[in-house]
Amino acid sequence: MVSLQTAQQSNALVANLPRGLVALFIGATSGIGQSALQQFAQHAPAPRIYTVARPPAVAGHESLLAELRQVNPGASYNLITADVSLVSEVDRVVAAVAKSETKVDLLFLSAGFMAFEGRKDTREGLEPSMSTRYYSRQRAVEKLLPLLNSADAPSPRVVTVLAGGLEAPVNERDLDLREPRNWSFWNASVHAATFSTLSLERIARENPRISIVHWFPGTVATPGLARANRFGMSPPNPTSQADAGVRALFLATSDRYAVQPGLVPVPAGLGAAKRSGGGIFLVGATCESSDNERVLAPLRNRGVDKVVWDFTQKIFDACAAQAGGKDEL
């Protein structure tokens, strides 16, 4: 277990990092992503920060960014208005970042929700809880690979907040859970988490400089948890959103979760975190490594990771075609 105090002490050293780190936060209008953004803005020296908000959330997020400008006036804050339940909107977000930047040092992904009300597809034909938690996040990572690989840091970082270490068998005959009898909010959650790990492992193998963390933060007192409570899910003893933000910054900056050191040194008494058999960091609520090879190794051995990858690329091609453009990943 990594204590909160250890994470806080490590985070204080973020101030010693080079000026001008570039970070993109997708999912920072509330919850863990918002707290992670606040922590990064508080500690990083003169960073260039990009965030994304759906139109209804823009005003509230602008207020948060105004507060952060007071906390760290040397930073730049850039808000992109987009609905990341749509893959085509993610493409637009990436294009906006690429227009202004030649690198990205940190990509922090936390957008998502559980569709308790049932499946209601987006105009791209995707179920939005799976889209925000998997398709759109995966699209952002893939599209940003050139900028991530151009980062000044020895090992640029991707952190996705979902369910690392809790992967489970998926419905291989209906990957998108298109059949009504196969879809449930829980099955969608399992598919999103497992697909994320398998696809991110492929990214890691093909991009060895990039450190990828798939984090299961446990139960956190976010607006998402309050919504779950209304649907009868009331897990005990949630962590505060602020404490989760502290751990989020630790995962985003500590060399403990880096394939190559060069950011914040590993705290005394801790070793480097272990990677999954596919090459990414699966991390639990207290920032310790999770071992889920019992599930993941058979999936890799049977080639399910390639099946998921190929299926995902077909989804991306269809979204790009619908948007009137040709995918050039």
Image (cartoon, grey):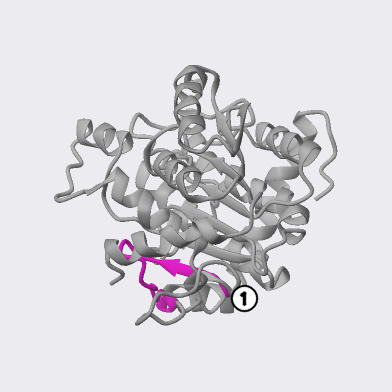
Q: Nearer the viewer, residue 153 or 174?
A: 153
Of 116 and 236, the residue lying toward us:
236
Q: Relative to residue 156, is residue 249 drawn left or right?
A: left
Q: Is residue 206 above or below residue 174?
A: below
Is residue 204 among what the camera can see? yes
72 shown above or below 272: above
Residue 15 image point, x, y percent:
51, 56
Where residue 200 sits, quadrant-wise, is bottom right
Residue 172 in sight from this viewpoint:
no
Whole-percent x, y for residue 230 in the image: 21, 30
* Residue found at x 47% / y 73%: 256
Q: Which residues are magenta?
A: 279-294
Which residue is under mark 1? 260
Q: Is 290 colored magenta in this rendering? A: yes
Q: Main secondary structure of the magenta part?
A: loop
User: Whole-percent x and y of residue 55?
Assistant: 55, 19
Q: Residue 263 at what x, y percent from top left? A: 57, 67
